[in-house]
Every structure is written in C-alpha cells, then in structure tokens.
Image (cartoon, grey):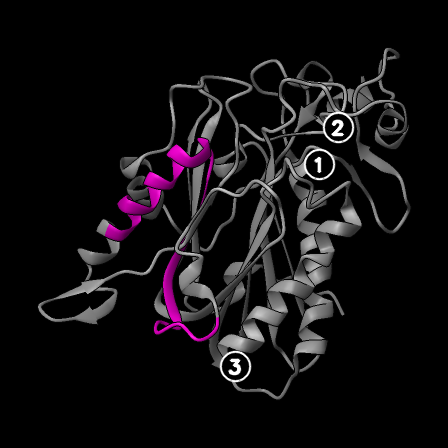
C-alpha cells in the first residue's frame, strides 16, 4: 500500500542539492552519516562511477556514509571529494589509524549537451550540497537533474527536459523503501500503468511525440549526442539487510527503470542504482517483498523527475510541450 512517505522518512537520511541553472548542471548528495549497508547494480554501457568496486560482495567495507549523484560527466565525480571533507570535519567515516575515511560512492550523468560544458560540479559543489541537506527533497530541474534531458532519438534539438524525482513505498508493517532518481535517458519515458508516452522525441506538430521505436526501426541513432546520457539513482530502506541482500535488491530495483524508460540499459547510457540499507527497522521482511516495492518506487521517481522538470537552456519540459 502506498503511503505518504519519502526517502528521508528513513531515519538517518537527508538529501541536499547544489544547482547552477545558468550552466545547467548540479549535484545531489544523499547523506547517511550513521552508515548504511550498501551495494549497487550497474546496467548501462557507459557508466561514470566512483567506489562501485567497494560495493561488491566480499569486499572489506560494508557501510557507506553518503552517495553522490552528479552532472558533469566524469568530471562531476570530484563532487564526492567535497562530501568526504564535510563528513571528515564531523568525524564521520571508516576508522583507520589516526583518521577516518568517509566512504562516498558516486555516479554522474553527461549533461554537456545543454548549458555549459566547462562548468561542472566540483568538491565545493559537493560540500555545498551537504550544507543544505535536509528532510525536504526538491524535485525536477535541480541538483543532478538540472542538466538532464530525455528522449534523444531525434537529437538534442528534439529532446525534452529530464530531472530528478523521488518516491517511496511502505509495507503495512512499517518498512520504508524510497527512491531518488536523476533521469537523463537516451530513451523515451512511459507511464507503465497506462502505457502513455510521457516524454518522447518532439514531433513537428506541437504537443506530439515521434515514436522512438519507429525511429530505431528505420535507422541507427546517428545523433552526435547519442552517448550523452545515463539514469542514476539511490534506493534506500530502513530494513535490516546483508550486503548480498542489498545487491539483489538493487538488481530488482532496476526493473523500475525498464518499465518506464525505453530503451534502457543501452550502450550509450550509464544506468545504475545504488542501494542503501540503514538497518534501523528489524521488522521481518524479505528481498522479494522489498524488491517489488523498490521497483515501484523507482517507477514513480522516474515519472516524477520528468513531470516535475521545468524548461532550461532552451529545452522544454514535457508538461510544457504537451500543454502548449
């Protein structure tokens, strides 16, 4: 049953954005300074990531202290350094001799095709996002979603704005599963319940879309922006999970992307989901139950990202295009 909950309903998690609207880029931090069992599932063919090897099962460290989602392609990974500094100043991190090492995995989208290609989130941006982190989650064209675009089968000149969106589900016993997703997909976005295209390549007729599948039937994607994509997100739960269970839950959560983005996990997308388990709620559950809810939360977060977006850098939002 869906309830009025969010990612930050999970005790110990806060979210902050840093946004540069003029450059159309930004970053988002999910803070969990008390630590969360973490894993990740990387499905896209063009990822830009940091610390994902550490998240594999069998590695020494099980808990992370933050996750960063950023624009700026691989340059944006620098934002995680600022998050590390913010956490270190507060004594948060993996204890080592004479210091702590905050564990901060990160992933980036490619957002150079709009705004500025030379302004990217950096360590100062990540630090600034931590400074404003709170229980409130802004959605749309902010943070890692600022420069996001979708539906690029006809090139960036026919694309629509992507963004960042959040959603959550809760079991009747009170376990929460939330998702925060930055949607910068090459493919179009579809409402899985109705089958309606929410954001597709803009057609010649105002308010209408061209079918991505029809375009692919006729031609391979020749757009110079074909490789500038990725949908990246964080799924978090307060359930008690092992690292192995967290990894399986990340895999299942990715099906939420498959139900809302077509095509997804392509060679030109760096799609991935991070999974965080704070382990604060010891109510009995299993990965099957949580996986179904996680996938649903991801679906809703993807739709919210696109429907909450506003036009930026000359790219209209889907809601503005349809209602024009």
Q: Position of residue 309 (x, y in %)?
A: 63, 32
Tag 3 or tag 1, which sits nearer the N-term? 3
Disc 3 target residue: 240
How many residues crowd around disc 3 within 10 Å: few (fewer than 14), some, or many (20 or more)? many
> Mark 2 and mark 3: span between their CA atoms?
39 Å
Please tell me the numbered disc located at residue 185. Answer: none
Instruction: Tell me the element at label 1.
Output: helix
Q: Are marks 2 and 1 in contact (CB under 8 Å)?
A: yes
**Is residue 105 within the magenta segment?**
no
Instruction: Tell me the element at label 3.
Output: loop
Residue depth check, mark 1 versus mark 3: number of the one nearer the observer: 3
What residue is shown at x 71% (from left), y 50% (from top)?
257
User: Count of labels shown?
Assistant: 3
What residue is shown at x 61% (from left), y 46% (from top)?
271
Compared to residue 282, the image places residue 64 above or below, namely above
Is residue 171 among what the camera can see? no
Q: Position of residue 92 (x, y in %)?
A: 24, 64
Q: Which quadrant of the figure contains the C terminus?
A: top right
**Is residue 73 within the magenta segment?**
yes
Left or right: residue 235 versus residue 154 is left
Tag 1 or tag 2, which sits nearer the N-term? 1
How many residues crowd around disc 1 within 10 Å: few (fewer than 14), some, or many (20 or more)? many
Please tell me the numbered disc located at residue 319. Answer: 2
Q: Which quadrant of the figure contains the N terminus?
A: bottom right
Q: Position of residue 118 (x, y in %)?
A: 38, 19
Q: Which residues are magenta?
A: 57-84
Instruction: Tell me the element at label 2.
Output: helix
- Nearer to me, 235 or 2: 235
Please tell me the numbered disc located at residue 307. Answer: 1
Compared to residue 71, the image places residue 160 above or below, namely above
- Answer with the quarter of the image where residue 313 lies: top right
């Amino acid at each position: 049953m869906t309830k009025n909950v969010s990612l930050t309903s999970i005790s110990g998690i806060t979210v902050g954005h840093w946004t540069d609207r003029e450059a159309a880029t930004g970053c988002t931090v999910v803070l969990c300074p008390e630590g969360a069992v973490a894993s990740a599932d990387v499905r896209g063919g063009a990822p830009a990531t940091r610390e994902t090897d550490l998240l594999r099962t069998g590695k020494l460290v099980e808990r992370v202290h933050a996750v960063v989602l950023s624009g700026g392609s691989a340059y944006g990974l620098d934002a995680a350094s600022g998050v590390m500094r913010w956490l270190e100043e507060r004594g948060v991190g993996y204890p080592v001799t004479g210091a702590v090492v905050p564990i901060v995995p990160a992933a980036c989208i490619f957002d150079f095709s709009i705004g500025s290609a030379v302004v990217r989130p950096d360590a100062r941006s990540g630090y600034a996002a931590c400074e404003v982190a709170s229980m409130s989650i802004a959605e749309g064209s902010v943070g890692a979603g600022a420069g996001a675009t979708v539906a690029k089968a006809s090139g960036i000149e026919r694309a629509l704005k992507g963004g960042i969106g959040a959603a959550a589900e809760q079991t009747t016993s009170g376990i929460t599963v939330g998702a925060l997703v930055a949607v910068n997909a090459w493919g179009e976005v579809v409402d899985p319940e109705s089958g309606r295209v929410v954001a597709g390549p803009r057609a010649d007729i105002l308010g209408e879309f061209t079918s991505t599948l029809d375009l692919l039937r006729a031609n391979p994607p020749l757009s110079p922006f074909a490789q500038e994509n990725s949908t990246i997100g964080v799924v978090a739960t307060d359930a008690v999970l092992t690292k192995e269970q967290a990894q399986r839950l990340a895999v299942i959560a990715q099906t939420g992307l498959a139900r809302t983005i077509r095509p997804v996990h392509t060679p030109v997308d760096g799609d991935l989901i991070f999974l965080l388990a704070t382990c604060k709620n010891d109510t009995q559950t299993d990965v099957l139950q949580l996986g179904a809810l996680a996938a649903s939360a991801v679906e809703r977060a993807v739709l919210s990202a696109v429907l909450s977006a506003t036009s930026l850098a000359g790219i209209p939002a889907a809601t503005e295009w349809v209602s024009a």
